[in-house]
């Protein structure tokens, strides 16, 4: 049976989003109601644009809008994040925002593409053409020179994100010089492409497309955005250490994946054993990658929702080892990034406090936007203490993990983001022209654009000093070189 996923976003421009989204949702609900009909009409389903794979969880390879409900642009409220009125008799305005953003949806790497071509070759030799013509006649459409480059959907994700963040903090950003913003990227092209697309949306929200566009510049900083490639201890003890991935391999070789494989053989009428567990994973990824880039994929036709949940879980085990809590070095190594974020807050507060009453406050960074990878944002989540399930996900406990916090498709999809907004709060009655003796500073955090409780806080808005204190150990004692030493003992010998 063939399956096609309709994505909420589409090729022909942003203004179409609203209508298209409404249409997509109608399409979904219709699909649910007429599922049995779809079964009967499975032969025609190949032409259908409606969905028969309900589950859109592709672990860390999920496009942003498949899992996060993205606000329609017309409905994004200007300054939604700018003011916090009536906070215990205080009025608060945003004075600084700091964002860490994963790059947008991208093409698969060349290794995966070649692997997929090989899998297809084996399948074609083992199956009859008319069992699944779509899959039988599949041709690779991924460009051979676009190794992990951002594609159209990824650019759209970033453009939209830039617009929405710009609009929600409009008053904070609108009259600022380009020099009051900081754009940080990694040495990988896809983070630069993400930053540019983000900036386009951002300037569109500022209504100042004409003059500042060309001046956009970003700084490459791999210690902040690709610490995972520079931290020797992480590389040798986790990333390149096969034993560290034991749970992942156990699940990959286990009964759940075996069952998926058997079902695929049945669907394709295959008698011999031609697919290895790693092939199943890739075929699943192909379904996600192709649907993101080209709207549909014949690879999805061999999977059902249960299979997708199984393979999504496999991806999450991998994500938890590679980018999560499993090994302390994985998240400890993100301390330079965490420090940079908090030093940005410290500096802002210092500038404001040191400005004489009759001076105009200014000259500090109002917006810091840092573009990285799943391996950047995962460790950042963990050092912050987010999505830390009381029982870690393992090969043998999938059934108990249905409500896990650590669901990569939800928390670390393409274009995943963590945004902190720092507020200056003054007593209401002093709001206008009177002198203010003291200001309080509050912090709010947004995960994928939704307010999220900062660990250790009682409310969404949390006193800055309290948050600063909680993480002070990582911020003020971040010794990346020492932390990442391969082996202190061996080095000394
Ligand atoms: C590899 O991972 C295993 C399991 O986590 C660990 O015991 C071992 O020390 C690691 N190897 C290295 C070289 O760090
Ligand atoms: C890892 O970090 C956690 C949280 O800080 C701590 O409780 C634990 O003892 C650490 N584990 C190791 C092996 O250092
Ligand atoms: C994650 O949760 C575990 C168990 O609740 C806890 O022991 C650990 O310290 C937490 N890790 C971090 C980094 O907060």
Image: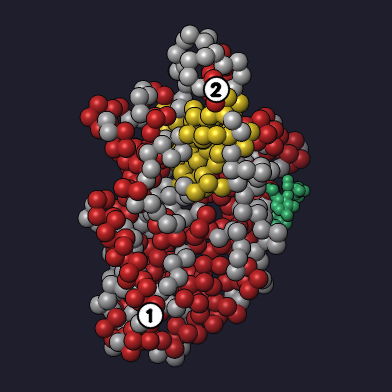
Q: Is residue 316 left or right of residue 168?
A: right
Q: Position of residue 255 (x, y in %)?
A: 60, 80
Q: Does residue 142 appear left or right of residue 456 in this picture?
A: left
Residue 423 visible to the viewer? yes
- Which element type, helix, strand or loop, lies under badge 2? helix
Q: Residue at x 34, y 52 (%)?
A: 72
Residue 177 position by quadrant:
top left
Residue at the spot 53% in from the left edge and 64% down from the top edge:
315
Residue 388, x across and y down, in percent: 65, 54
Q: Quadrant of the N terminus?
A: bottom left
- Give the answer, above or below, for where 484 lies relative to 62: above
Residue marked by disc 2: 429
Determine the image quadrant of residue 395.
Answer: bottom right
Image point (47%, 85%), residue name: 263
Report crowding for label 1: few under 14, some 14 to 19, many 20 or more residues within 10 A (C-alpha). Answer: few
Q: Secondary structure at mark 1?
A: helix
Task: Return the residue nearer the eye: 261 or 233.
Answer: 261
- Which colour assignment does the render follow? secondary structure
In three-dimensional space, the C-alpha distance between marks 2 and 1, rounded to whole angstroms, equals 57 Å
Q: How many marks?
A: 2
Residue lying furthest front? 429
Say above or below: 62 vs 177: below
Front position among marks 2 and 1 = 2
Q: Is residue 202 above or below residue 115?
A: above
> Residue 214 versus residue 225: which sits nearer the camera?
214
Residue 289 position within the rendered picture, expressed as x and y whole percent measured from the top left? 38, 63
Q: Earlier in the sequence, mark 2 or mark 1?
A: 1
- The residue singled out by tag 1 in the image is 33
């Amino acid at each position: 049976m063939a399956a096609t996923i309709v994505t909420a976003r589409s090729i022909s421009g942003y203004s179409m989003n609203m209508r298209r989204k409404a249409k997509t949702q109608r399409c979904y609900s219709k699909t649910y109601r007429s599922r049995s009909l779809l079964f009967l009409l499975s032969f025609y389903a190949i032409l259908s644009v409606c969905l028969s794979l309900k589950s859109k969880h592709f672990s860390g390879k999920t496009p942003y809008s498949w899992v996060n409900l993205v606000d329609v642009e017309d409905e994004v409220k200007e300054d939604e994040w700018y003011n916090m009125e009536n906070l215990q008799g205080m009025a608060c305005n945003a004075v600084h925002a700091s964002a860490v953003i994963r790059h947008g949806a991208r093409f698969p790497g060349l290794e995966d593409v070649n692997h997929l071509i090989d899998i297809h070759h084996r399948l074609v030799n083992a199956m009859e053409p008319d069992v699944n013509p779509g899959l039988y006649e599949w041709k690779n459409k991924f460009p051979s020179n676009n190794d992990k480059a951002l594609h159209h959907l990824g650019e759209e994700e970033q453009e939209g994100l830039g617009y929405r963040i710009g609009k929600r903090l409009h008053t904070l950003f609108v009259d600022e010089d380009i020099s009051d913003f900081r754009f940080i990227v990694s040495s990988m092209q896809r983070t630069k492409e993400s930053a540019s697309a983000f900036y386009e949306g951002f300037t569109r929200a500022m209504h100042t497309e004409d003059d500042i566009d060309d001046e956009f510049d970003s700084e490459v900083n791999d210690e902040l955005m690709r610490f995972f490639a520079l931290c020797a201890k992480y590389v040798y003890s986790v990333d390149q250490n096969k034993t560290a991935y034991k749970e992942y391999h156990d699940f990959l070789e286990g009964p759940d994946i075996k069952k998926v494989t058997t079902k695929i053989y049945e669907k394709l009428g295959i008698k011999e054993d031609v697919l290895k567990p790693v092939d199943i994973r890739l075929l699943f990824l192909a379904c996600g990658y192709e649907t993101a880039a080209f709207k549909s994929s014949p690879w999805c036709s061999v999977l059902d929702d249960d299979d997708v949940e199984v393979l999504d879980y496999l991806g999450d085990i991998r994500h938890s080892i590679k980018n999560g809590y499993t090994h302390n070095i994985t998240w400890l190594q993100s301390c330079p990034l965490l420090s940079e974020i908090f030093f940005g807050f410290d500096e802002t507060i210092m500038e404001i406090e040191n400005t004489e009453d009759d001076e105009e406050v200014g000259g500090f960074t109002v917006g810091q936007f840092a573009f990285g990878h799943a391996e950047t944002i995962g460790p950042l989540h963990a050092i912050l203490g987010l999505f830390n399930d009381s029982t870690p996900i393992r090969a043998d406990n999938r059934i108990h993990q249905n409500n896990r916090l650590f669901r990569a498709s939800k928390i670390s999809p393409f274009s995943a983001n963590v945004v902190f907004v720092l507020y200056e709060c003054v007593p209401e009655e002093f709001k206008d022209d009177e002198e203010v003796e003291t200001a309080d500073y509050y912090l709010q955090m947004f995960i994928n654009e939704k307010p999220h409780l900062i660990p250790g806080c009682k409310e969404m808005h949390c006193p800055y000093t309290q948050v600063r204190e909680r993480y002070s150990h990582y911020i003020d004692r971040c010794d990346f070189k020492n932390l990442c030493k391969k082996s202190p003992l061996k080095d000394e010998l």
